[in-house]
Amino acid sequence: MFYIFGSGGAGTAAIGALVAFLATFILMKVLADKLPCDQGRAFAVEGSLSRGKARGAGIIFVLVFAAVSLLFDYIDNQKVIYLAVIVASMFTGYFDDASEKPWNEYLKGALDFGLAAVVALTYLYYNGNRFSVFPDPYISVTIPYWLAFILIVILVWTSINVTNCTDGVDGLSATLTIITLGSFFICMKYAGADDFSRSILYFVIVLAAYLWYNANPSSMLMGDAGSRAMGMMIAVVSLLCGYPLLYIPFALVMILDGGLGLLKVALLRFCKIKILANTRCPLHDHARKTLGWSNTQVVFRFAVLQFIINILVLYLFESV
């Protein structure tokens, strides 16, 4: 491994973080009128309010993240592959955002599978098929390669899609992603598996810059370009942390918010089973339409729930 700038010390990391924030902040302001315009979503609660806003801002903060990671973090083959996959997942979302007609969901599913397969093959090649089990770092299991491949693909596909479905309220998905990635950052530092921790820092920083424009009422939307890349980033980090099962508690609010809707649709379409008939999905729409929560209340309450869960899990993790 090697660094392009500096020796990889804390000073270099701080400079990289500052560059990441300023570059994202400035480029979003300068390039806002170059992004596609949102058409609004008739099926979503208050979906019409997003009509005309700049959409696809994920292309800006993801490319800034990748560039800063390459310049101010260590470089090796495994890291470059993961960064390429994160950028690729962003582009699949961006071209969908920019298309006059939304892409077929089966096409997007196939693209997700292809990217998930690359992540699985890369991880298994560089790290093997032995996985640590939370919470004891001294207990691990060896999984057959074929089964490990399938489980990793499921993890990546799930993370991409539940994160994407959560992106429906100003500031919600980015805030939850920051909490999730921040929790993995702490775990990596504790477990000594911090090869990717600086990239987590840079991703959190570019999301913070994006939230400057996406805070309610937003002037800019990340679109699928941002949400799909966030989901990919979370999946990669959960693997590299060494405790992939931590994805479940660390992203539980997103899993419930976006995942229940996916489960509801899948059961109805393929099995003709109807569940949650009186519940709107994603759950953030149920909270706004049925429970009467404001957008700000949804963001803060969902974030508080995820924060409490993660604090408790981190406490248990450190106590073992």
Image: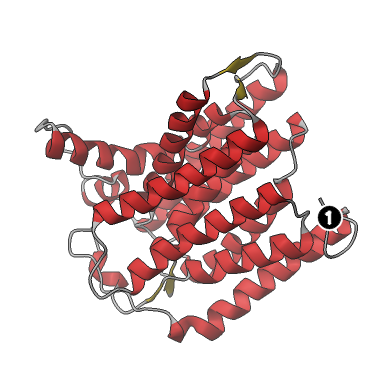
Q: Is residue 229 above or below residue 95?
A: above
* CA neighbours of label 1 inside 10 A, class few (<14), some (14 to 19), many (20+): few
Residue positioned 45% across, 53% down in the render: 173
Please give left or right for residue 173 compared with residue 310 in the image: left
Residue 216 seen by the camera: no
The location of residue 76, given as percent across then percent down, is 74, 51
Residue 8 visible in rendering: yes
Q: Is residue 50 above or below residue 312?
A: below
Amino acid type shown at disc 1: Phe
Which residue bears the numbered disc 1?
2
Horizontally, residue 92 falls left or right of residue 304, namely left
Q: Nearer the viewer, residue 300 or 274?
A: 274
At 75% from the left and 31% from the top, the residue drawn is 190
Q: Quadrant of residue 273?
A: top left
Locate residue 101: give its quadrant: bottom left
Where the C terminus falls, by quadrant? top right
For mark 1, give the secondary structure: loop
Q: Position of residue 302 (x, y in %)?
A: 43, 44
Quadrant of the image occupied by residue 267: top left
Q: Residue furthest top?
A: 139
Q: Nearer the viewer, residue 235 or 252?
A: 235
Image spot of residue 58 (x, y percent) = 49, 66
Q: Could you tell me which residue is drawn at 47 percent across and 61 percent down?
A: 90
Q: Horizontal placement of 45 versus 124: left or right? A: left
In front here: 250 or 70? Answer: 70
